[in-house]
Amino acid sequence: MAAGSRQTVDYLSIAGVVLSLLAVIGGNMLEGGHTDSLFQLTAFIIVFGGTLGATLVQTPRKVFVHGLRRVKWVFLPPKIERNETLKKINHWSRTVRKDGLLGLQNIAAKEPDKFAKKGLELLVDGNEPEVIRKILEIEIDSSARSEMNAARVYEAMGGYSPTIGIIGAVMGLIHVMNNLADPAALGPGIAVAFVATIYGVGLANFFFLPMASKLKTIAGDLTQYQEMLLDGVVSIAEGENPLAIASKLEGYLI
C-alpha cells in the first residue's frame, strides 16, 4: 500500500532500544559488576531458542513469516499522511464532478496504493455504494486481522521469554548442585542461572512486548487510513458534493 511504501526512521524506537541497553549495562557497571558477566552464550541459547521454539509451535507458518517481515515497521514504520489522503480524495471527487466516473480511469491506473486502487476501480466499474462498501470492508477486516496476528507473534514471544528464562535459571542451579564438590564449576553455573533470568525478562520487556504494542498501534493507524479511503470512495459513489466529502473526512485528521 502507498501508506507503507514511504517510510521514515522512527528515532524514538532506536533511542528506546539504546537507552534500555545502556541502563542495564551502565547500572551493572555502577554497581561494580563486569560487563562480561552479562554476556552468557549458553543462557542466550536457552532463552532465545526456547522462546522461538515455543512461538513456532503456537504460530502458523504464514503468520510467523508475516510477523518477521513486520519487524522493520518498528524502526521504519509506514508513513501515513492523512492530510495528503484528504487532498487526494478531494481531487477524485472533483474529477468525477467534471469528467464523470470514467475520469478516474487514468488515476486508478497510476495509483500505487492497492487499497485505494481497488476502490477507484470499483468506482469506475459503476458499482453501487453499498457494494463498494461491503467489498472494501472485507478488505479492511482481512488486512487488520493479518497485521494484528503479526503483532501477536511478538506478544507470544514476550509471554514465553520470562518463563524460559526461569527454566534456564533452574537448569543453571541444577548444574551447580551437581558440581558442589567442584568449586571451579560453581561460578559459571550460577552465572548462567541468573543471566538466563535477565535475558528472559529483558527480551520480553525491552523488545518483544514493546514491538507487539508498536505493531498494534501501526495496524490501528493503517485501518483508520483505509476507513478514511472507504468513506471517501463511497461518498463519491453516492454523488456527494466535494466540499461535503472534505468536511466529513476532516474528522479523521484529529
Image (tube, grey):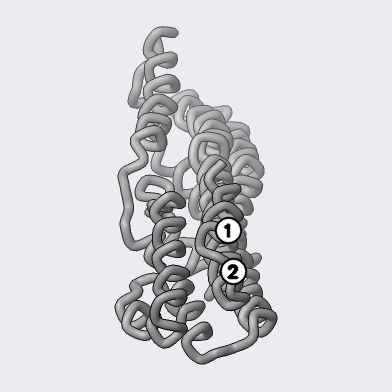
Residue occupied by mark 1 = 244
> Please, is residue 29 above or below residue 216 in the view?
above
Question: Could you say whether the residue bearing mark 2 is in a helix, strand or loop?
Answer: loop
List x then y, in percent, for residue 127: 59, 88
- Identify the residue shown where x is 62% and y is 33%: 177
- Identify the residue shown where x is 43% and y is 50%: 83
The C terminus, quarter of image: top right
Give the numbered dot on residue 240. 2
Three-letter amino acid code at the position of disc 2? Glu
Q: Residues within 10 Å of mark 2 (few under 14, many from 20)?
A: some
Outermost residue to the bottom: 125
List x then y, in percent, for residue 233: 54, 72
Q: Residues within 10 Å of mark 1 (few under 14, many from 20)?
A: few
> Please, is residue 247 above or below residue 5 in the view?
above
List x then y, in percent, for residue 28: 42, 16
Q: Are marks 2 and 1 in contact (CB under 8 Å)?
A: yes
Location of residue 11 by image quarter: top left
- Identify the residue shown where x is 38% and y is 82%: 103
Q: Is residue 153 visible?
A: no
List x then y, in percent, for residue 45: 45, 49
